[in-house]
Amino acid sequence: MRGTQFAELSAFVAVAQHLNFGKAAAQLGISSPTLSQTIRSFEERLGVRFLNRTTRSVALTEAGARLLADALPVLDGIDKAIEAVNGFRDRPSGALRLSMPRAVAKSLVGPLLPEFRATFPEIKLEVVADDTHSDIVSGRFDAGIRIGERIAKDMIAVRLLDEFRMMAVASPTYLACFPGTATPEDLHAHNCVRLRSDWDGAIQSWVFENAGRRLETAVDGSLVLNDMYLVVNAVLDGIGVGYVPELLISSHVANGRLVPLLGNWCGRVSGVFLYYPSRHHMPGPLRAFIDFIIRARSDAAPASPNFRIV
């Protein structure tokens, strides 16, 4: 396959998977006009239309659907062949694309990037902070990071962080003006800062457990945000009560800027996992990243068991 044909085929597959020229262009690292011209030239050279496109939508033709089905195994085989050659290298190299929530990107992965880049300078790493939980396969990501409950059963998961608690917290400034709380039901009397998830558009439930009892509390408040960091900052500013991961606010609790509420009532999350599609041969860059981040977390555990806002 000549270079031009490979570039055209790769461009077509990107558009066919995203059904969006802007997203495909961003993935390929080229401009949308350049991508559009590449697809147009591809179709004109072969004399077949692969995509029906309007100003608002992109759809595969019958020929395009057939080409996509035939092309994916070819491109995957090329990737595997190149990766197999990397097995003979002393140091892993190649591209590595990872998708993860913003909180993980900023607090867990971000601080490790300088050391990872210094250790593996020949790996081209791309980190996409994405709270929508997009499909890593269709997005052509090598792996993703999520909490365990939101990982599809057909993925291979590697634990990065153990189970952690979700806590109701408030600032001393807020608590000076409003009564304290003893049970989740008491939250009805408070202004609660709520989180709307990007991945499904729903407002996060406040679920608490204690001594075998489980309560899901319907809270209300004057502020809804779509970013956990904004929630924490709003709570620190005294706007209201927040329901946040303990591992994000442990330093603020330690220095007295936030006060845990409800005693032993808390929510629980199974943990944070890196996950990837099952495949016979794991890419060298992905294996290097997994080994690196597990080792980094293990080394940091005695002094810093949780990641935090930085």
Image: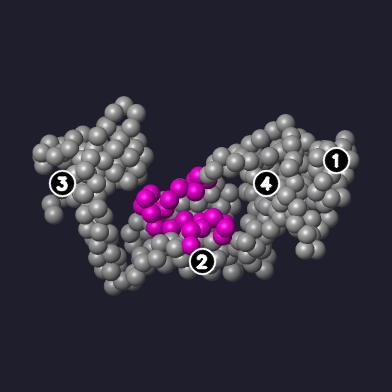
The amino acid pointed to by label 1 is Leu
Residue drawn where x is 34% and y is 70% of the image = 280
Question: What distance separates the C-alpha of mark 3 from that of mark 4?
Answer: 51 Å
Q: On the image, which quarter does residue 163 sit in?
A: bottom right
| Inter-mark Cα distance, 2 to 3 | 38 Å
Which residues, given as a range, are shown in magenta? Answer: 130-153
Say what secondary structure mark 4 lies in: loop
Query: Closer to the camera: disc 2 or disc 3?
Result: 2
The secondary structure making up most of the magenta span is: loop
Residues at marks 1 and 4, CA–CA distance in whole angstroms: 22 Å
Q: CA distance from mark 3 to mark 1?
A: 65 Å
Q: Nearer the viewer's eye, disc 3 or disc 4?
A: 4
Give 232 or 89, whichever is nearer the viewer.
Answer: 232
Q: Are marks 2 and 3 in contact (CB under 8 Å)?
A: no
Question: Is there a contact, CB below 8 Å, between mark 3 and mark 4?
Answer: no
Is 1 one of the magenta-colored residues? no
Of residues 148 and 69, the one drawn nearer to the viewer in this rendering:
69
- Mark before the other along the chain sequence, 1 or 4: 1
Which residue sits at x=23%, y=40%? 61
Seen in the picture, residue 68 relative to 276 is either above or below; the reply is above
Q: Quadrant of residue 171?
A: top right
Q: Which residue is mark 4?
A: 205
Left or right: 65 as drawn, with respect to 97 = left
Q: Are marks 2 and 1 in contact (CB under 8 Å)?
A: no
Q: Earlier in the sequence, mark 3 or mark 1?
A: 3
Say which residue label 3 marks.
4
**Would residue 231 be visible to someone looking at this image?**
yes
Q: Residues within 10 Å of mark 4 (few under 14, many from 20)?
A: some
Q: Secondary structure at mark 2?
A: strand
* Between discs 2 and 4, the one toward the N terminus: 2
Q: Earlier in the sequence, mark 2 or mark 1?
A: 2
Residue with the mark numbered 2: 158
